Amino acid sequence: MGRIRVLSDVVANQIAAGEVVERPASVVKEMLENSLDAGATRIRIEIEGGGRKLIRIADNGHGMVRDDALLAFERHATSKLRTSDDLLSIATLGFRGEALPSIASVSRLQLETRVAEEPSGTLVEIAGGNIVRVEDAGLPAGTTITVRDLFFNTPARRKFLRSEQTELAHIAALVTHYALAHPEKHFELHSAAQALLVAPAVVTASDRLFQIFGKETSGLMLPTTAEMDFTRAGLPEPPPWKREEDYTPPDPGYIRITGFVSKPELQKLNRNSIYIFVNRRLIRDKLILHALTEAYRNIIPPTSFPVVLLFLEMPAQEVDVNVHPAKTEVRFRQSSFVHDFVRDTVRTTLMQARPVASFAAALHNSPHASASLTIDVSPLADGPAQPVFEPNLPQSEAAPSLDDAEVFNLAAPLVPESAGRLNFPEAQIPVGYDEAAPPNENETLNALATLKPLGQLRDSFILAVNDEGLWIVDQHVAHERVLFEKILREREVERVQRQRLLMPVLVDLLPAQMVAFARLADELERNGFEAEPFGPHTIAIKAAPVGLEGREMERMLEEVLGVPDREQQTENAETRGRRIAASIACHAAIKVNMPLEPAKIDWLLAELGKTEHPTSCPHGRPIALRYTHKDIQRAFHRI
């Protein structure tokens, strides 16, 4: 008798559930995507026990007839695909037909659904993959799916779940993602008696950003938008001998990007505040994350991450979503084109905005995982102001008698009469801010050209004023930014200024640094160095970039050559060149505790105003802080 046998449908579904249903948030994701594909405009999610005890999602989508409701629990039964060609242009969030049977095989599931044209709906109840009952029921139009006792028949999977608060936090983050992607829809998330998220439908993405994250975070975001046709990507076409007589070139379509990126002053310690959507689908793509890292390179510290909300739209045939069981990873047909488009768009937005950091905000600017970008899922976030019930007994030892009790009346509280309808102006009250509105001129660093220097503070910081208020400029990082962009410009035209040394400078290196020098010798030469090996562990420097001399030159080489080999192998030519340029600028720049002549200060402020990124040095530290006239008045209680 053979050893190979066909698994039963129940076992096959449980195996599929291991790929699709990783945790309660996976169940919410699959059912939430089904609701969105069904055209729902109102979606309500209820959670108990972090999703272990109960997950209920109700929507007002188009619903299902009885036959479809039963067929939906068959494996690979879907309304979104017909032929294999449809896999090349998937426009819906779900398409495999695995989610419902997989979820039903590891839980007790109840489906209630009705199409608007039918007088009654259908109720289907399944436990562990077995149908318990099917009957007609009076139901509202739409679909409600209730999942109870998740993983009740697979205790090993249930044992690996995290705490209720952790699982609920994953669900809250997921719902937040989709609420941001669909501002035109109403979302609600409830846990027990606590409303974690209530997001009514709004008009624009900026309104939804303001609605969920509040004024403080949305005020630190910059709107970005760009569009480019795929013709520039050079789309592949069949060779002439394989084309039909009536062949017409396909329409390449467009790639569009809209959304918001954070100002440099808003930083996080992880990537959890980066929200990326491709054709309204939530993804976690290394390619896009790398593009965002490159866009913010030399603007924020390398250990910090921005807050990003990006929506990419492109033809369905340009992105393959059928590469991951949970559909969270995608593959782009023109990956390098998409990468460069995202990087250049975000970088251009930051260059044009030139945001300025306020003095007060900079005092609390250490990057941290702010609670403003996550929904608080604690049972009582702030705790009750006082105990829910606290008996107020008399202090005497005598027990209270019945005569001491007040008469108890069950009556509605008296509500004072309303003064009538409040008269608001006819104009609509703004919720967020207009996506197309340019940044406020007073909130940018374009005013650097109008600064009048007052002097130096401890020979390290330049104090200056203009009509906006008091400015404090870090002279070292300001000069570092000026030199950094100067080096990059000279590299592009291959006219890096170098100075020849009267006597070669000998620098001793470790064996690993000698290996790194052999790899970076050409790049160092393009940055103004002229060096060659002088023995097994020594190099002789004959020329160096202008401004770099003495001990600072040796420190710069040790810093560049001391980067771990693993990081050097992942660098491309541009990243490597910018890293070396940043190191040269840092060691050649004006130092702190260095007095400057007034003419030198004027020159530095003028040159800083000409740079593309006067917001921060190449290592991410802020350059200028502004203490506005209004802040000063407020501090002195003038307003």
Image (tube, rainbow, N blue to C red):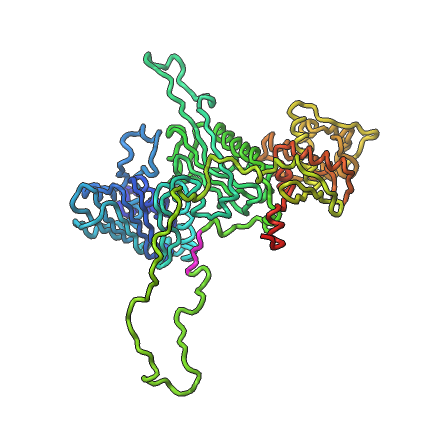
Residue placed most toward the observer, 19 or 548: 548
Please provide percent x and percent y for residue 157: 37, 53
Q: Is residue 121 left or right of residue 463?
A: left
Secondary structure that dominates the magenta span = loop
Q: Quadrant of the N terminus?
A: top left
Q: Identify the residue at horizontal 50%, vertical 32% (top origin).
A: 342
Residue 1 in magenta stretch: no
Whether residue 260 is visible here, answered yes or no, is yes
From which residue to which does the magenta span run?
Answer: 375-379
Q: Identify the residue at horizontal 41%, vertical 43% (top origin).
A: 180
Q: Quadrant of residue 553?
A: top right
Please provide percent x and percent y for residue 6: 27, 42
Please provide percent x and percent y for residue 250: 37, 20
Q: Identify the residue at horizontal 52%, vertical 41% (top origin).
A: 262
Q: Is residue 43 left or right of residue 617?
A: left
Please provide percent x and percent y for residue 173: 42, 48
Q: Identify the residue at horizontal 48%, vertical 46% (top origin).
A: 272
In the displayed orientation, state which residue is furthest to the bottom.
398
- Can you say whether 185 is above or below 410 in the image? above
Q: Is residue 449 left or right of residue 99?
A: right
Residue 378 in magenta stretch: yes
Image mark count: 0
